[in-house]
Image: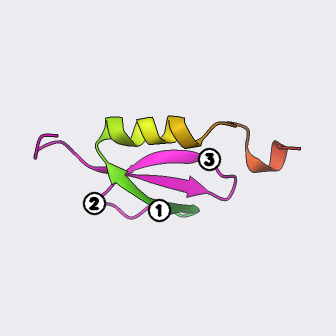
Amino acid sequence: MSIDEPYYRIVVNDEEQLSLWPLHKEPAVGWRDIGTAGSRGECLAEIRRIWTDLRPKSLRV
């Protein structure tokens, strides 16, 4: 990874939806850090690995 490449963190909301957020910014209201950070590609790979049911939590049976 290049030293100039931006770093991201993975954030989650109450519906257990995941997203990327720039590491240098605080997550938006309603989102919290799950403790995983890295390059955009690394974070997207981790999201693909852990987010297997894309439905919001409130729609899961």
Amino acid type, mark 1 = Asp
Residue placed under numbered mark 3 in the picture: 17
Bounds of the magenta span? 1-28
When the figure is inspected, residue 57 is found, relative to residue 51, above or below; the finding is below
Task: Look at the numbered disc 2 and give the secondary structure of its residue.
Answer: loop
Residue placed under numbered mark 1 in the picture: 33
Q: Are marks 1 and 3 in contact (CB under 8 Å)?
A: no
The 10 Å Cα crowd at callout 1, few under 14, some 14 to 19, many 20 or more, is some
Main SS of residues in magenta:
loop
Which residue is located at x 56 percent, y 43 percent? 50
Question: How far apart in space, not on screen, are marks 3 and 2 (Cα)?
Answer: 21 Å
Residue 43, picture quadrant: top left
Residue placed under numbered mark 2 in the picture: 24
Image quadrant in which the C terminus is located: top right
Question: How far apart in space, not on screen, are marks 1 and 3 (Cα)?
Answer: 12 Å
Amino acid type, mark 2 = His
Mark 2 or 1, nearer chain start: 2
Provide residue 47's location: percent of width, then percent of height. Answer: 50, 41
- Between residue 33 and residue 26, name the one nearer to us: 33
- Between residue 50 and residue 12, name the one nearer to us: 50
Q: Is residue 52 left or right of residue 27?
A: right
When the figure is inspected, residue 5 is found, relative to residue 27, above or below; the finding is above
Direction left: furthest residue = 3
Which residue is located at x 11 percent, y 44 percent? 4
Which residue is located at x 35 percent, y 40 percent? 42
